[in-house]
Amino acid sequence: MIAKYRLLALDMDGTLLNDEQLITPETAKWIQKAKNAGVYVCLSTGRAFRSALPYAEQLGLLTPMVTVNGSEVWRAPNQLYRRSLMDPQLVTKMHDMALEYGIWFWAYSLNEVHKQDNWDGDVKNREWLKFGYSTEDDDIRHKVLMRLQDMGGLEVTNSSPYNLEINPLGVNKASGIKSVCKLLGINMSQVVAVGDSLNDLAVIQKAGLGVAMGNAQKTVKQEADVVVASNNEDGIAEVIQKYILSDAKISGDSVTVR
């Protein structure tokens, strides 16, 4: 029989990876068990493809990937399925705002990450995927958020309580995972989505089972169907054991779904 849930969509930082940026042996073991049971495992991350790929390779994943918060969907590693670009004029406005408030910023173009130390001002001749800000000043961060919302045409989330991540409007991990479902011939009710930050919120709300890590932000925990252990306590292994393979007979390293 086929498992009730066919796709496990995993955020990376704060979810799949512990605080040392590692996939623990226990988590890797249970991901392999899920794969053996016929469950697709998909990385769904705010990271750029090049930063996510080594972890996909470590896990032996040949399945679709969602990167840059949904701005890119990959049919398989190195096989691009779709890409959503940001209006360069909006990138210029967001850069100007970073300078105005004197806060750290970054921006993803197709080929590199641009920050204060390598910003050359050439916005027009690049294709842009995402912009971000980081500041521990709550007041400034709130002012920036309000101005971003007034600009329109933007999807604003975060990957930590201290940053803001901006994609084109309508581009998020939920839209990315919907594309993955289309590629795999399944639907969102068959997806388990796991995350810890606001950039995971849309897909957690849309998935068949939305899971928040124990270290997740409060809003994510409130919106999730279940909360599991933290990223430092093998929360992903718990997800697979309790909610994906709970109807499976497990013997050694093999899994048979009843």
Image (spheres, rainbow, N blue to C red):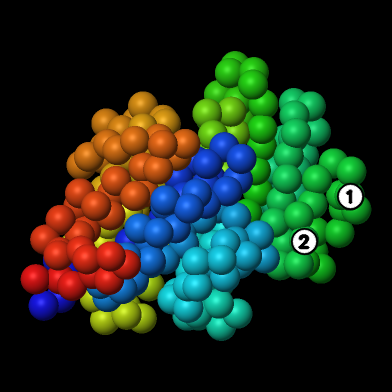
Q: Residue at x 47, y 73 (%)?
A: 61
Residue at which label 1 appears = 118
Mark 1: secondary structure: helix
In this view, 113 is above or below 15 = below
x and y percent of residue 75 in the render?
47, 80
Give the Cα separation between the discs numbered 1 and 2. 10 Å
Residue at which label 2 appears = 112
In this view, 164 is above or below 143 = below
x and y percent of residue 78 in the render?
60, 79
- On screen, residue 90 versus residue 167, left or right, reads right
Residue 129, quarter of picture:
bottom right
In this view, 173 is above or below 180 = above
**Residue 176 tag number:** none
Q: Quadrant of the C terminus?
A: bottom left
- On screen, residue 135 versus residue 186, left or right, reads right
x and y percent of residue 72 in the render?
54, 68
Residue 19, quarter of picture:
top right
Marks 1 and 2, the one that precedes in the sequence: 2
x and y percent of residue 22 in the render?
57, 48
Q: Residue at x 60, y 34 (%)?
A: 163
Is residue 20 at least partly visible in the picture?
yes
Q: Amino acid at mark 1?
A: Asn
